[in-house]
Amino acid sequence: MSTPGVQPLESSPSPKPPTTLDLHKIAPTRDERLFLVLAIFIGVLSGLLVVSFRVAIEWIKILTLGSAPHPGQYRLLFVPAIAGIVVAALVQLFFPGARGSGVNQTKAALYIYNGYISFKTVIGKFITSSLAIGCGHSLGPEDPSLQIGAGVASIVARRLNLSRQRMRLFAPIGAAAGLAAAFNAPISAILFVIEEVIGQWSAAVLGSIVLSAISSVVVARWFWGSEPMFRIPSVTLRDPRELIAYAALGVVGGLFALVFSKALGYLRPRLRTLPRWTLYCQPGIAGLIVGVIGFLGLPQVMGPGYEVIDQAMHGQFAWKLLLALAVFKLLATTISFSSGTPGGMFAPTLFVGAMLGASIGSFEKLFFPHFTGSVGSYALVGMGVLFAAFLRAPLTSVFMVLEVSGNYSIVLPVILANTIAYLLARSLQPVPIFEVFTHQDGLDLPSMEEQREEIIVHIEDALQPVDVPIVRGNQSIEDVAALLGESSSREFLVRLWDGSWFAMTVEELTSARATLAGNTPMEKAVKSDRTPALFPDMPLDSVLPYFPRWPLLPIQNRASRGTLEGVIRLEDALTCYRKH
């Protein structure tokens, strides 16, 4: 005998062995099997290329500028100028894709060109950036390393004939590998790629990014060692008043970030609108200006300046000189980058931030000697401050400071100063600098800052009270029809024996009455495609695919199966979207 209201189970035939076609459907695809393995392979390749890139920069620097450039050397004048002319010719004639920092170019490859970065662009970026940075232009190697890594990933994906979707995913995987090797900081690279390149992530993508970043760092550390990039003494906040100085550093960093952004936003598009022939000499003139700054007394602003950052951390400069270095580094970087010289913004940003922080730390030591904070701690916090305010990557800035120093006792000052700088810079300059560059280049790439702060609308925001009749699954069709005859509603809900729900229309009930006996329970009239289980905390867009089938959707309580929180219709969802 069968239990009333419950459909009897039918005997099922013996299962047939899966065919070749069935196995093909359930087996992992070729792309899926290769994905994680290729992430490690890309990390290793990117690590080797970035190590070679950094070595090339150092060799070029020693061969052209010497191991210790100092003011008054005439080669400081002509080496950057000649290198700028050579680089400009290479970019204009052979490697047009090598222009710029590399971050926006990687985003464009991801969102516009399906992850395509040519081998020619990778080679061009390597050659032109190493020449420009090694010969003294005020730029850094991190952003080009990011694009080189993304290019390696793109080349590997194309060689293996991977799908278009996989190719788009490989660009950020390679980008994380290149940046991790350049920074020797895998966590910061992963966070930056998520914050600035892809904006959102899934578990599969994150796992591949982590594998590639760690693989590249392992390769880099095999050559450079595992020591952090900078070393500072442990930070001990014995006097809470020191936090005021770190807060002041956040304010100063936010203002400097505004000046930096405004200067680049003003000069870069104006140089690009000049006659085309000037593009061949703009990097040379920029190199000459940077060389003049070095020749007249501040050669520290030339190149990435990591050794200068280390000197500032150990209190080797007076606070007035530190401020001068910050100002002239900002000027030199603005001119170098705006001229179209290939190179990155990371190192100059860290340089300016470190000089600002060290100047405030030196000022504090001079006038408030009873404070215990070290100059190195202020310089390190300053690096994170400008990174957060100028590049608009607040999460990356915190972990970057921790990774490059290996000092976790500094986390409180870093978070305080970075937050102040980020909020101040955002209020004064709403558009992030990479988005400014995007608009100047005539592209329409997604704003990662807006995506991070976009309000997610949930089902509960559009939820309405239950305003339709509710019937039980064991009620007969005739009883339900009589009940609905007294109601003006054209829809109703059926609660089934297992606690699930089915949304039904009067027309569907009429059709069931025509084919089934009147005493048939509603559960037998319910079709096999059950109304999906939806909950208030789910994103509102998750209900949209169901409206062509069901006129309304019941929303259930997660803690009590079958208990309704309300219902939602298509017009409710659309009204909610209009409000938001």
Image (cartoon, rainbow, N blue to C red):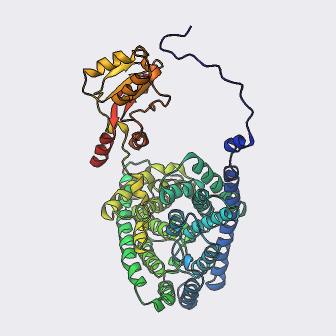
Query: Which quadrant does the N terminus fall into?
Result: top right
> In the picture shown, does residue 317 fall above or below 427?
below
Task: Determine whether 2 is above or below 415 in the image.
Answer: above
**Residue at x 31%, y 45% (from the top left corner):** 574
Res 360 seen here = yes
Q: Is residue 136 left or right of residue 502?
A: right
> In the rendered view, would you say 333 is above or below 255?
below
Front residue of this view, candidates 227 and 138: 138
Q: Is residue 564 visible?
A: no
For residue 163, which quarter of the picture? bottom right
Which x, y percent locates residue 211?
65, 52
- Which residue occupies the extreme front position in the image? 514
- Give coordinates of residue 508: x percent, y percent: 39, 29
Residue sitting at the far top: 1
User: How many marks can you see?
Assistant: 0
Front residue of 375/82: it is 82
Please tell me which residue lies in front, 89 or 559.
559
Residue 200 percent across, percent down from the top left: 49, 52
Q: Quadrant of residue 434?
A: bottom left
Query: Where residue 113 appears, x then y in whole percent?
Result: 54, 67
**Residue shown at 25% from the left, 23% from the top:** 487
Q: Is residue 122 left or right of residue 455?
A: right
